[in-house]
Image (spheres, rainbow, N blue to C red):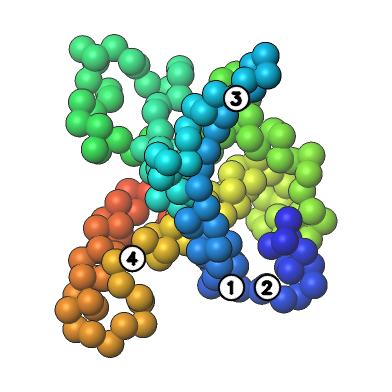
């Protein structure tokens, strides 16, 4: 909401500013403890006590990006879950079914998350985004696909933020060893984006 407010106020106009806004929020919350407890009949049960040492960025935000944006699982009805069909790679490290790789499927099929997302988000489009869509070749004829592209662009911003936030050294370091470590770290991430929809949604 603060990001949207800053955009409305003209304080955020460019993608790097979006990334920096999200990054500042991640940094501020990075070391916040993740805890969970329930109260039953007047007694408190610590399910995830503070002593476990779970923190927001490393233990929740980054695994979420990894599981939902990058890996994910194939949508039911899109590929076979039959192991003999070999449509799902047995090497889980090569799973690329996350939101950053998902094709927009405007078919209205039940149970396909991108379709459901597009259907829901079309009711809440801000006027300025609708105007952008209307100026394109097909206008709003393929509105749901355009929404999916916008959603994926925003998820790339969040992923970029997580990647930058976990860099082994400050990105502006002048130490050559630290620069080399950062480059190795970033190249590994760039390799993962090669088969994503990054280029497509930015065309």
- Residue tagged 2: 12
Q: Is residue 94 visible?
A: yes
- The quarter of the rendered structure image containing the N terminus is bottom right
Does the residue at mark 3 contact the one at mark 1 (Cβ under 8 Å)?
A: no
**Nearer-N-terminus badge (4/3):** 3
| In the displayed structure image, the side of residue 159 where residue 134 appears, left or right | right
State which mark lies toward you, 3 or 2.
3
Is disc 1 surrounded by few (<14), some (14 to 19) or many (20+) residues within 10 Å? some
Does the residue at mark 2 contact the one at mark 1 (Cβ under 8 Å)?
A: yes
Which of the 4 image quarters holds residue 134? bottom right
**Nearer-N-terminus badge (1/4):** 1
The label shown at residue 44 is: 3
The label shown at residue 17 is: 1
Q: Is residue 98 visible?
A: no
Q: Residue at x 24, y 38 (%)?
A: 93
The Cα atoms of the two marked residues, 4 and 3, are separated by 38 Å
- Residue tagged 4: 167
Question: Which SS class for mark 1?
Answer: helix
**Nearer-N-terminus badge (3/1):** 1
Closer to the camera, 55 or 14? Answer: 55
The Cα atoms of the two marked residues, 1 and 4, are separated by 19 Å
């Amino acid at each position: 909401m603060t990001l949207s407010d800053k955009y409305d106020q003209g304080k955020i106009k460019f993608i790097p500013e979006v990334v920096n806004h999200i990054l500042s929020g991640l940094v501020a919350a990075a070391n916040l403890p993740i805890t969970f407890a329930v109260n039953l009949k007047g007694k408190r049960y610590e399910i995830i006590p503070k002593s476990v040492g779970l923190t927001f960025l490393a233990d929740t935000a980054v695994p979420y990006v990894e599981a939902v944006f990058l890996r994910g699982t194939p949508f039911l009805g899109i590929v076979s879950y039959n192991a003999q069909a070999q449509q799902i790679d047995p090497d889980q490290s090569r799973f690329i079914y996350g939101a950053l790789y998902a094709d927009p499927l405007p078919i209205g099929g039940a149970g396909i998350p991108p379709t459901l997302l597009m259907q829901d988000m079309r009711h809440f489009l801000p006027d300025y985004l609708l105007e952008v869509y209307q100026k394109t070749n097909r206008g709003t004829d393929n509105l749901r696909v355009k929404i999916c592209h916008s959603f994926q662009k925003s998820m790339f911003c969040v992923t970029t933020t997580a990647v930058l936030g976990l860099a082994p050294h400050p990105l502006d370091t002048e130490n050559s060893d630290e620069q080399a470590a950062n480059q190795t770290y970033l190249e590994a991430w760039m390799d993962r984006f090669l088969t994503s929809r990054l280029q497509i949604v930015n065309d």
